[in-house]
Image (spheres, rainbow, N blue to C red):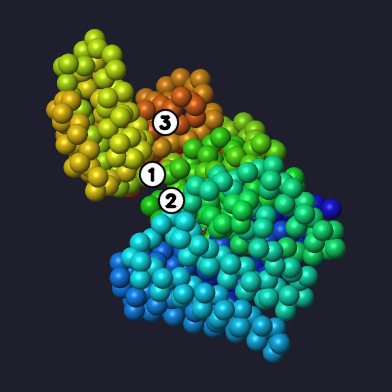
């Protein structure tokens, strides 16, 4: 029987209506003879609010912090009450939610007393989001006749102790999945677990990093050698560009892992980049689907995408970037200079996205951060430094640009009216990126989309949906 890991993001479990939709999607898979394992995020925005509560407490604002927690308690209680009508199950769930919030409030009071928030405690605080959402979803599914069984993700997803970005221990996870999930699946049950949260082998709570529920989905899929991993979100899959910027955006029906990984960095909205890895290793297809529109086929991410007539699959944009220019004639014919520059970025723990060098100058791009003045001050010990914010990186991704002649000319012709600051063609040869002013980004995307998606390949892009949308109503 086909085993499928179904991951639902925060918006797919944000309120009773969303959880009902999610339950019927899972029920549909069961009715179709599949064996699902369900992974859920915290209810939408809860992770942010928990982080805020922790930060408030550690800053000494005990009242403010407990007020956030109290609002979260009501939201979870109300959601549970709306979903679970059976008196006994409802009371049990209500008590469970209260116990969890009592424990959380203890931690917040402790933080307000010691005025310090460590990464370890931060992980403990945010873990309540997924611990609660998974309980509520499991109870709601049970009441809807699904043989749901709650599993604490921290018993299965085992990691090292790098809090806030813990690294999973694949072989341990495989054993734990065998121990905790297989028996349930064999009994015909549907395991329901939280994403994002994990624990060390000693049982200390960790997390996989923001947006980490996709990663959990892929880890579980990999550990169980699932037949597919479904990422349920609130968009119809990966699009050729942001539909809010360009209404002609098309759904990409199929894309390769490599292409999706390039895009993930830009549009973290759809997929966590690391999601791809456990799935790639075991060659498990990943489907991005819309829980508000479950009949839509979404986007299928597979190892080897079919050949596509269009050179690009998608145009992504990353905004809020800064460009730093370092100019020194001293660099001419010397060595070790780049190392000195990078040591400074390393010291400030600032990741560099794109680099371009000439004999006497280096330009680098980074996320705009408040560390920039300090970085610039350090760099100015080496050379002349200038930095400028409000830049955007436009990234065109497609495997079929490999070896194609004249693509760069076509790209820059499409944006000839826009000032391009930096250009990079990734070593992977499936990505062409360039840096422009943030204010020009939308216009650039529209021009590029018009130039490259005039005659989209119907095997790869959902041309039908666009035809329907543009047909006059009869
Ligand atoms: N709830 C976590 C977050 O907001 C994980 C996730 O949603 O994937 O980052
Ligand atoms: Mg999320």
Q: Which residue is mark 1?
A: 317
Location of residue 64 with respect to 10 vertically, above or below: below
Image mark for residue 416? none
Viewer-proximal residue among 59 and 301: 59
Alpha-carbon distance for marks 2 and 1? 9 Å
Q: At numbered mark 3, what does the secondary structure look like: helix, strand or loop?
A: strand
Residue at x-position 57% and y-position 79%: 99
Disc 2 residue: CB within 8 Å of ligand 2: no
Q: Quadrant of residue 434?
A: top left
Q: Position of residue 216 (x, y in %)?
A: 61, 52
Q: Which residue is mark 3?
A: 432
Viewer-proximal residue among 179 and 77: 179
Residue at x-position 53% and y-position 55%: 206
Residue at x-position 54% and y-position 30%: 399
Count the labels in the image.
Answer: 3
Q: At numbered mark 1, what does the secondary structure look like: helix, strand or loop?
A: strand
Location of residue 271 with respect to 350 vertically, above or below: below
Q: Is residue 395 visible?
A: yes
Verify CB contact (< 8 Å) between mark 2 and mark 1: yes
Alpha-carbon distance for marks 3 and 2? 17 Å
* Mark 1: few/some/many CA within 10 Å (<14, 14-19, 20+): many
Location of residue 229 with respect to 28 vertically, above or below: above
Verify CB contact (< 8 Å) between mark 3 and mark 2: no
Q: Position of residue 160 (x, y in %)?
A: 56, 46
Residue at x-position 56% and y-position 35%: 258
* Mark 2: few/some/many CA within 10 Å (<14, 14-19, 20+): many
Q: Which residue is mark 2?
A: 242
Residue 449 falls left or right of residue 93: left
Which of disc 1 and disc 2 is earlier in sequence?
Answer: 2
Viewer-proximal residue among 139 and 100: 100
């Amino acid at each position: 029987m086909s085993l499928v890991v179904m991951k639902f993001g925060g918006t797919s479990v944000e309120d009773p209506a969303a959880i009902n939709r999610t339950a019927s999607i899972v029920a549909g898979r069961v009715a179709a003879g599949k064996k699902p394992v369900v992974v859920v995020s915290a209810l939408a925005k809860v992770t942010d609010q928990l982080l805020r509560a922790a930060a408030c407490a550690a800053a000494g604002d005990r009242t403010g912090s407990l007020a956030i927690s109290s609002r979260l308690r009501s939201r979870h209680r109300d959601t549970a009450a709306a979903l679970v009508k059976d008196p006994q199950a409802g009371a049990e769930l209500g008590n469970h939610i209260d116990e969890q919030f009592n424990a959380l409030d203890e931690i917040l009071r402790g933080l307000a007393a010691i005025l310090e928030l460590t990464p370890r405690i931060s992980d403990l605080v945010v873990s309540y989001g997924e611990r609660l959402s998974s309980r509520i979803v499991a109870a709601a599914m049970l009441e809807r006749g699904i043989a749901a069984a709650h599993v604490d993700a921290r018993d299965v997803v085992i990691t090292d102790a790098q809090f806030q970005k813990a690294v999973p221990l694949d072989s341990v996870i495989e054993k734990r999945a065998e121990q905790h999930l297989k028996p349930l699946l064999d009994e015909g049950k549907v395991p329901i677990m939280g994403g994002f949260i994990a624990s060390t082998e000693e049982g200390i709570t960790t997390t996989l990093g923001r947006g980490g529920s996709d990663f959990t989905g892929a880890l579980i899929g990999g550990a169980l050698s699932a037949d597919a991993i479904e990422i349920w979100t609130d968009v119809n899959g990966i699009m050729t560009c942001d539909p809010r910027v360009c209404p002609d955006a098309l759904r990409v029906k199929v894309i390769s892992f490599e292409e999706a990984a390039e895009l993930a960095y830009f549009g973290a909205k759809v997929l966590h980049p690391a999601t791809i890895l456990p799935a790639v290793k075991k060659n498990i297809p990943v489907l991005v689907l819309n829980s508000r529109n479950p009949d839509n086929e979404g986007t299928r991410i597979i190892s080897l995408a079919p050949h596509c007539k269009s050179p690009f699959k998608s145009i992504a944009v990353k905004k809020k970037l800064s460009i730093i220019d370092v100019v020194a004639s001293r660099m001419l014919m010397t060595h070790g200079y780049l190392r000195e520059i990078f040591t400074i970025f390393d010291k400030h723990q600032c990741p560099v996205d794109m680099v371009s060098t000439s004999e006497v100058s280096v330009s680098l791009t980074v996320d705009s951060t408040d560390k920039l003045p300090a970085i610039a001050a350090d760099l100015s010990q080496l050379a002349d430094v200038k930095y400028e914010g409000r830049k955007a990186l436009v990234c065109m991704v497609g495997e079929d640009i490999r070896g194609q002649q004249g693509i760069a000319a076509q790209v820059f012709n499409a944006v000839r009216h826009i000032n391009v600051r930096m250009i990079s063609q990734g070593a992977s040869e499936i990505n062409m990126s360039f840096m422009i002013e943030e204010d020009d980004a939308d216009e650039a995307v529209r021009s590029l989309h018009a130039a490259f998606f005039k005659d989209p390949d119907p095997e790869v892009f959902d041309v039908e949906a666009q035809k329907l949308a543009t047909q006059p109503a009869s």
